Image (cartoon, rainbow, N blue to C red):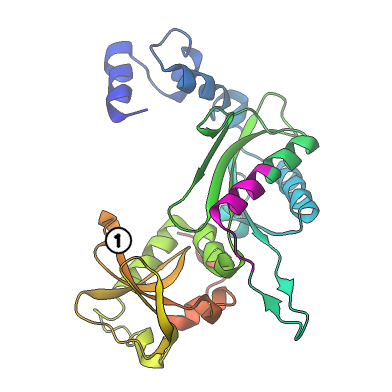
Amino acid sequence: MTKKDILNLVNEHNVTGAEDLYARRFELPLREVFREFLVYARVGKSAIPMDKEETDTIVNRFRAVAADLDLDFQPVGSLRRGRVGGHDLDLLFCPRALKNNDDDVPAQVELDNAARDALMTRIHAAYRKLGGLAPVVGAGHGKVKHGASADRTLTSHVVVESPKIDGAYRHVDLVVTPRSLWPHALLHWSGSRTFVRCFHDYVNRLREKNWQGGPERRGVKGWRLDPNENRLGPPVFERQLEDGEHWHWSSNGVYVATGNFYNANVTKVYEESNASFPDEHSIFRFFFLDYLEPSERCA
């Protein structure tokens, strides 16, 4: 629904809010796909916040799905920060690390687009068997709103039936990430939004503001990239920033880029090896920051 659509509903049809929109959904000039989706809106019974019992039931169902599919699983978002009582959940999935036969060191598990898409479909199907995946109208996967992000994670917004309140629905964001990006996805999806925005800004301005220098001073190991972001030659050490370049962090990793992130005009020129980041602590450490527990990242 566009801003123009909303203004039309308010000015021409005197819609006063979400409850009013839901109650009059069959008489208002709405697109059919939007009218169907309103069934799952956060109004009526669905507006009642989840308590700990309901939250744990939904999370444990998805945890069982992850175990059945041999996936690592972590509730993120506000729940990881210690807050219970919302209307939605964010859940992170990742293939478990394999063991190399020779040295018993965990191997990196990567997923191409087709593998991530297939894995997400299996998560949907497994949860349906446990009961409660509502038929959400959307593009890409029939009745499931499902889409790949521009980075190397896959997100899927689904609606589940409340296991506690009959007729209520809960919104869940499912995120599938490759093993090598697990620490970055964990940090990004744990939030809060304000914390992540501040983290982005700190990293982007690290050298510009001379905040304790930059990672290039530590002689980090990474890769030079061609314009198509293909790796060139062996890993490089002591990457120095050139004019117009800045460090950047996202759920896709750490890299040097040019351009403005907020204008979606960023070009990668260097990518730090994800082997440098085995956990969240290492990301903080890389940027000369003290580690913050998830509960300390609220705003």
Give the quadrant of the N terminus. Answer: top left
- Of residue 250 and residue 230, the one placed in the foreground of this image is 230
Residue name at image x 68 percent, y 23 percent: 167
Q: Is residue 199 visible?
A: yes
- Where on the picture, by quarter, is residue 219? bottom left
Residue 111 x/y as whole percent:
59, 59
- Where on the picture, by quarter, is residue 224? bottom left
Residue 51 x/y as whole percent:
68, 42
Q: Secondary structure at mark 1?
A: helix
For the residue marked with disc 1, what is the amino acid? Answer: Phe
Give the quadrant of the C terminus. Answer: bottom left
For label 1, the crowd category at 10 Å Cα-Cα, with few meaning under 14, some 14 to 19 and many 20 or more, is some
Task: List the residue tagged with mark 1.
Answer: 261
Q: Is residue 290 visible?
A: no
- Of residue 98 and residue 170, the one placed in the foreground of this image is 98
- Of residue 81 and residue 237, the one placed in the foreground of this image is 237
Magenta span of residues: 109-121
Residue 141 x/y as whole percent:
57, 34
- Where on the picture, by quarter, is residue 109? bottom right
Magenta span has 128?
no
Residue 15 x/y as whole percent:
37, 17
